[in-house]
Amino acid sequence: MEWVTRMTDAIGYIEEHLTEEIVYAEAARIAGCSSYHFQRMFSYMAEVSLAEYIRRRRMTLAAFELQNSPIKVIDLALKYGYESPEAFARAFQQLHGTTPTAARHAGTKLKAYPRISFHFTIKGALEMNYRIEQLGPFSISGKKERIDMELAFEQVPRIWQSAQEEGLFGLLWDIRNAEHPIRGIMGVCVDGNWGKNDGFDYLLAIASEQEPPEGLEKLEFSEASWAVFEALGPPEGIQDLWRRLYTEWIPASNYELGHLPAIECYLPIEEGKNELWVPVVKKG
């Protein structure tokens, strides 16, 4: 199917550039989504981050070359993008548990990580509650923080904890647009510069038409269709929605991911649920 073909082509781009700079934005373009969505989608589907996959593949190929050619370690380090033989040796030992020099010897145990491939499989019949909403242009206001993609699951909870301690939630609630369909406190993952590989901006925000108070920023959204998914129970259920969005709903649906930031909407605790708002575009 088309989704599998796109992801396979994106992996092809990565594999062809393992000895060069890999631009995540280009891989994402081939996959038909934003850099942020591509990295998250990859992590949920492959159960390893994109950066870690690339490191493993480079070290796998480097080990093959050490065993089958007389290439110098310094040349191999430069070939796979390391600034020094020492940095390359540290990365090599971290993955393989041995040094590049020892890897040349017969009997040395090494690890090989093959090229990943994607296939569409039918999952169980567990339901996903969703609806499609059409929203006109709107704006949100909130506090923005820069997130390292590799550390997101550590950094984002700390942001929420700090927001609670600093009284940010009360400030956001005071400026909210009470009539807006996205009713709760939002966690918004903003792509920023899609050409960068190092992370993304995270906005803790609320739907608001007011000018943001000092220290907060406004973000404008254009008119779009949104797929809205419900997660019953505590906020942690949102993460399972992300996984199922990428691995089940997008491959089987008649929609593609839109090029707007997705929104995690955290509703008042008494409602017993939260929502994931994902911009989508109908195929064809």
Image (spheres, rainbow, N blue to C red):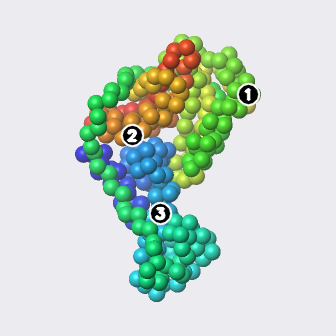
Secondary structure state at the residue bearing disc 3 = helix
Find the residue positioned furthest to the front: 107
Mark 2 → mark 1, Cα distance in angstroms: 33 Å
Camera-side mark, 2 or 3: 3
The C terminus: image quadrant: top left
> Looking at the image, which residue is at 37% across and 61% down?
115
Mark 2 → mark 3, Cα distance in angstroms: 23 Å
The answer to which of marks 2 and 1 sits earlier in the sequence is 1
Mark 3: few, some, or many residues within 10 Å (few <14, many ≥20)?
Answer: many
Q: Which mark is residue 246?
A: 2
Q: Which mark is residue 165?
A: 1
Specify the amino acid type for callout 3: Arg
Mark 1: few, some, or many residues within 10 Å (few <14, many ≥20)?
Answer: few
Report the front residue among 119 and 26. Answer: 119
Rendering quarter of residue 126: top left
Q: Which mark is residue 112?
A: none
Pointer 3: what residue? Answer: 56
